[in-house]
Image: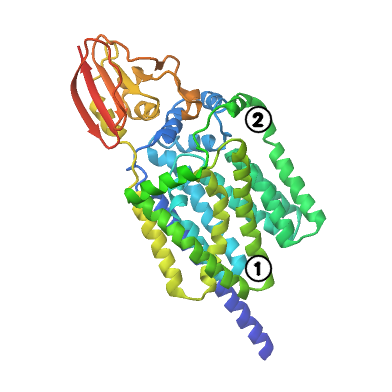
């Protein structure tokens, strides 16, 4: 009788512990949602977001036509299209990314719990909820938050599948791969390192790994019909990309600039430079004290993340693609082990300090985010432009989609980009025919010149004089008249 009572008490305690953990995951996820969703409408759209925004105003067939000529798979565009049925504001454009980024929090918690129990799970979720770069890309109307979350989901689903290779778990793994490759092509680069890491660190049978690899291959193969349709994207393979080759000279130049011009980015880099060695030291200590299964899990996730970075670096030997948004896809896999390592110390003050530091840095990054104030310029143009006589000339393509998105109908009709060679990666596939001109048109009325604040002036047609000039953050509007 006494033994049965103890069993019932133990079961009740277990249920309470699980309930407390689930409540903690919910609270941490709500924290992640809050820092991602706050004041989404206040920050103006930047160029890539505005590309998405302008595209969403077109019909669905027109959207797909542009996308298959651009350089991404279609999933994020379809999700944003659904969201913008509820509104055309930056909030709705960004909301799918907010949800996708928030979904990474419980996934990270599940990974961390496997490494060290409930506390490790909650700490891992908190780290992912508050990591500044993850928060910033989750507030961006692009596909990087979704792709990052899917890479993390793939790591969890594969781990579960090699533990118990049931049809259900293998199917879930296949679905994560499928959604991942339809969100961003570089998600595919995470698949081989994850499978290799699982084989070496989790040590399942060869049959299980082959099953998982076959499921991943089948899921990846579903992308083939889209790739055939999107074959025009392949012509970009031999053209320049925005990512610059890595070099010691370029790295030193960037580091010198950050030191000479201190700001939020300088603080973030300093935290990374100082924090990574500290977390590695804590992780090594926790690893030594951990049981065998936890050690295997830590090595698995570390190998997944480092392996993805290595593959990206190898690709960059052929064509430079090293960029923070791509690195995020793989470095996020390193965060659950970091969270579990912090929890493994048992020092609540250390965990609290890490959370406060991450939150403070994230808030600072969000509060000081610098985006050109194109809405100010658009408001100044509203009601002033005569489509029959005036021209709104843009110095280069950088602000093209922002002006189209924020400008009134008259402004949109006469926007012209002054440039002789517009790169494909600025969204060239979505430019309207005739909007790119080699020189400023000699309008019968006024020429409204829009340019970023650090650009030199364009050569203006003879007979035009500048009547006024107005600048907001990162953008200037000049009015030229005869």
Q: Nearer the viewer, residue 232 or 66?
A: 232
The answer to which image quadrant residue 9 occupies is bottom right
Neighbours of disc 1 within 10 Å: few (<14), some (14-19), many (20+): some
**Which percent across, then down, holds residue 250?**
46, 42
| 418, above or below 276, in the image | above
Task: Name the residue: 35% across, 42% down.
Answer: 41
**Which percent across, then down, holds residue 227?**
65, 30
* Residue tagged 2: 227
Q: What whole-number distance in Å separates the C-alpha atoms at marks 1 and 2?
A: 40 Å
| 432, above or below 370, in the image | above
Residue reaching furthest front? 249
Q: Quadrant of the N terminus?
A: bottom right
Q: Does residue 164 appear in the picture of this structure?
A: yes
* Residue tagged 1: 295
Mark 1 lies on a secondary structure that is helix
The mark closer to the camera, 1 or 2, is 1
Q: Nearer the viewer, residue 289 or 319?
A: 319
Task: Name the residue: 42% across, 74% down.
Answer: 349
Task: Name the residue: 21% across, 29% down.
Answer: 470
Task: Name the residue: 37% across, 26% down.
Answer: 404
Image position of 405 (left or right of 286):
left
């Amino acid at each position: 009788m006494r033994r049965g009572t103890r069993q019932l008490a133990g079961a009740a305690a277990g249920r309470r512990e699980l309930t407390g953990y689930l409540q903690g995951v919910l609270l941490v996820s709500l924290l992640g949602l809050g820092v991602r969703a706050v004041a989404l409408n206040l920050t103006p759209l930047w160029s890539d977001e505005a590309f998405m925004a302008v595209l969403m105003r077109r019909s669905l067939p027109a959207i797909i036509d542009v996308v298959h000529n651009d350089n991404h798979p279609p999933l994020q565009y379809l999700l944003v299209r659904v969201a913008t049925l509820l509104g055309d504001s930056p909030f709705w454009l960004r909301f799918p990314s907010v949800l996708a980024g928030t979904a990474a929090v419980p996934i990270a918690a599940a990974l961390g719990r496997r490494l060290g129990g409930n506390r490790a799970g909650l700490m891992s979720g908190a780290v992912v909820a508050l990591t500044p770069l993850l928060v910033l890309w989750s507030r961006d109307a692009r596909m990087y938050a979704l792709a990052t979350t899917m890479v993390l989901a793939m790591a969890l689903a594969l781990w579960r599948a090699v533990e118990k290779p049931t049809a259900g778990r293998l199917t879930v793994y296949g679905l994560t791969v499928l959604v991942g490759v339809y969100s961003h092509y570089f998600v595919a680069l995470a698949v081989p390192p994850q499978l290799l890491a699982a084989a070496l660190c989790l040590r399942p049978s060869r049959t299980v790994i082959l099953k998982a690899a076959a499921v991943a291959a089948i899921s990846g193969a579903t992308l083939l019909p889209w790739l055939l349709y999107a074959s025009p994207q392949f012509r970009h393979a031999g053209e320049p990309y925005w990512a610059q080759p890595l070099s010691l000279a370029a790295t030193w130049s960037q580091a010198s600039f950050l030191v000479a011009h201190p700001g939020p980015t300088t603080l973030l880099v300093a935290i990374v430079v100082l924090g990574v060695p500290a977390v590695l030291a804590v992780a090594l200590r926790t690893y030594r004290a951990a049981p065998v299964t936890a050690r295997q899990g830590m090595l698995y996730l570390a190998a997944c993340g480092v392996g993805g970075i290595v593959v990206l670096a190898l690709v960059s030997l052929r064509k430079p693609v090293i960029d923070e948004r791509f690195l995020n896809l793989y470095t996020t896999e390193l965060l659950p082990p970091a969270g579990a390592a912090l929890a493994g110390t048992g020092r609540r003050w250390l965990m609290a300090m890490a959370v406060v530091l991450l939150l403070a840095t994230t808030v600072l990054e969000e509060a000081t985010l610098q985006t050109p104030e194109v809405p100010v310029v658009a408001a100044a143009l509203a009601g002033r432009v005569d489509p029959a006589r005036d021209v709104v000339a843009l110095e280069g393509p950088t602000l093209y989609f922002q002006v189209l998105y924020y400008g009134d109908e008259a402004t949109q009709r006469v926007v012209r980009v002054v440039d002789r060679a517009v790169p494909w990666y600025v969204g060239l596939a979505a430019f309207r025919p005739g909007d790119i001109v080699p020189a400023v048109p000699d309008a019968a009325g006024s020429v409204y010149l829009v340019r970023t604040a650090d650009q030199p002036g364009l050569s203006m047609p003879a007979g035009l004089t500048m009547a006024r000039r107005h600048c907001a953050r990162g953008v200037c509007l000049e009015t030229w008249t005869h």
